[in-house]
């Protein structure tokens, strides 16, 4: 199973490098986050919603951290990654009522999920991140974690 | 006598709405403009703005509307396809629709040429409004703004040169009455200062603005129902602000700058989430 995942990952990376523009990859990342947000909204109970959001935040954090420490990611992309990382860290704290944030109430979880996506989408941060870095983040967040 | 007075008053109040207008839309669609609404529906902001601009143009009975849509570059076989769309409307009629290439042109060079070609009255006796839709215009000229031409440099100085080019294609040493910048973080002193050379009023956001952008749907009714460009500008900003707060959970901040007297009218809604307790306490004081 793991072998198949690795082969798929390499294949995806190869095809993506050949055909994609940075623009397409940014859209892929947005679509991926939106899919999870949609699932969160469709989940029946608050515990499930929280678990899904926490998983999303943890996956993205891990992907950002690994991407930032990768030798293939240029220095000029670090600022953009830092901004995204900071946004996701804050959402994690807020969801769980940590680090000075009020915990998001159960009845507000759907709105909070929408806010999370809009907060990422509205910033022009993604524009500054290169194709290689975005590809790495997507592979890590979507395909590996 | 009373009837005569009434006719005079009505005549005066209609002067503004009867006045010819020139509206220029420049839509930067060469980038990622995907966003999701509150229901998670995927939408393309640039495409929606283009549709709204056309709809407005079809309903403005007195005046002309120029629409420029800068779209992603594409190839057909080995040949570059045109990556700019242009629409010219006069008194609600579509007069011309053509494509153009942005590849080798300086910023707004082709656009200024098309405005010069089609505008019958080159003077600024009309009310002139320019709306620019795009991502944040960098303060320092830098590359990467145009997705199809990542090496092309863009920034406030190049944008300002482009505005000057458009104005000069019509009439030297004149100004727009209103410029709307539907972009992130361009509502600040630097931009206000540079753009004061080109416009009387500026609407721009000092913060991030969600890709649901500043809606211009109010324009038609405002043209009919406002008595001055000051009133039109304020009501446009208010309407765009209200549309944004109804469709987002994020911080929304829109400023109206009167660049002649230096005053600023602010429209602000704090984000529904993302406020730390300490900040929250400070804000409430």
Image: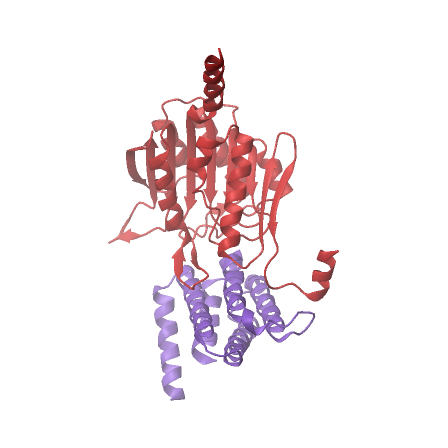
Residue B57: image location, x then y, percent: 36, 36
Residue A129: image location, x then y, percent: 51, 61
Can residue B264 be seen? yes
Asked if residue B231 lies left or right of residue B80, the reply is right
Instruction: Identify the image's colour scheme: rainbow, by chain, secondary structure or one colour.
Output: by chain
In the rendered view of the protein, which quadrant contains the N terminus of chain A? bottom left
- Quadrant of residue B108 in the image? top left
Residue B12: image location, x then y, percent: 49, 20
In the picture, one chain is red; tell me its letter.
B
Q: Residue furthest front?
A: B2
Q: Looking at the picture, does residue B125 appear above or below residue B279? A: above
Can residue B210 be seen? no
Q: Residue furthest top?
A: B1
Asked if residue A71 lies left or right of residue A2, the reply is right
Asked if residue B105 lies left or right of residue A72, the reply is left
In the picture, one chain is purple; tell me its letter.
A
Residue sitting at x 45%, y 19%: B11
Q: Looking at the picture, does residue B135 appear above or below residue A113? A: above
* Residue B263 vs residue B222, the one in the foreground: B222
Residue sitting at x 45%, y 52%: B150
Residue sitting at x 29%, y 47%: B81
- Quadrant of residue B64 in the image? top left
Q: Residue furthest bottom?
A: A1
Q: Looking at the picture, does residue A20 appear above or below residue B210? A: below
* Residue A107 vs residue A71, the one in the foreground: A107
């Amino acid at each position: 199973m793991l072998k198949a995942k690795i082969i798929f990952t390499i294949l995806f990376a190869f095809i993506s490098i050949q055909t994609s523009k940075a623009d397409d990859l940014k859209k892929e990342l947005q679509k991926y986050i939106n899919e999870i947000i949609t699932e969160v909204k469709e989940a029946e109970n608050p515990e499930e919603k929280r678990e899904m959001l926490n998983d999303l935040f943890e996956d993205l954090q891990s992907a950002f951290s690994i991407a930032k420490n990768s030798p293939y990611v240029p220095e000029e992309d670090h600022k953009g990654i830092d901004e995204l990382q900071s946004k996701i860290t804050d959402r994690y704290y807020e969801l769980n009522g940590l680090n000075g944030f009020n915990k998001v109430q159960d009845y507000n979880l759907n709105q909070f999920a929408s806010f999370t996506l809009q907060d990422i989408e509205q910033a022009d941060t993604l524009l500054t991140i290169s194709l290689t870095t975005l590809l790495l983040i997507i592979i890590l967040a979507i395909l590996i974690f | 006598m009373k009837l005569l007075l009434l006719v005079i008053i009505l005549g005066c109040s209609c002067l503004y709405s009867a006045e010819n207008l020139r509206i220029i839309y420049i839509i930067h669609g060469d980038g990622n403009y995907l966003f999701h609404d509150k229901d998670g529906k995927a939408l393309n902001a640039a495409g929606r703005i283009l549709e709204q601009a056309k709809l407005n143009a079809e309903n403005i009975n007195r005046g002309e509307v120029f629409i420029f849509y800068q779209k992603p570059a594409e190839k057909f076989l080995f040949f570059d396809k045109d990556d700019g769309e242009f629409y010219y409307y006069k008194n609600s009629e579509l007069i011309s629709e053509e494509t153009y290439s942005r590849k080798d042109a300086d910023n707004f060079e082709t656009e200024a040429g098309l405005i010069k070609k089609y505008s019958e009255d080159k003077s600024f006796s009309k009310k002139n409004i320019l709306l620019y839709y795009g991502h944040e215009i960098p303060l320092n000229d830098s590359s990467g703004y145009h997705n199809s031409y990542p090496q092309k440099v863009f920034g406030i100085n190049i944008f300002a040169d482009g505005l000057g080019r458009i104005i000069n294609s019509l009439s030297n040493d004149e100004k727009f009455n209103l410029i709307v910048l539907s972009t992130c973080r361009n509502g600040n002193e630097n931009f206000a200062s540079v753009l004061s050379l080109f416009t009387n009023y500026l609407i721009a956001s000092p913060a991030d603005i969600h890709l649901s952008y500043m809606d211009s749907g109010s324009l038609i009714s405002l043209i009919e129902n406002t008595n001055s460009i000051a009133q039109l500008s304020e009501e446009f900003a208010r309407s765009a602000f209200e549309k944004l707060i109804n469709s987002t959970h994020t911080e929304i901040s829109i400023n109206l700058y009167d660049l002649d007297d230096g005053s600023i009218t602010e429209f602000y809604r704090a984000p529904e989430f993302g406020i730390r307790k300490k900040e929250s306490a400070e804000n409430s004081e």
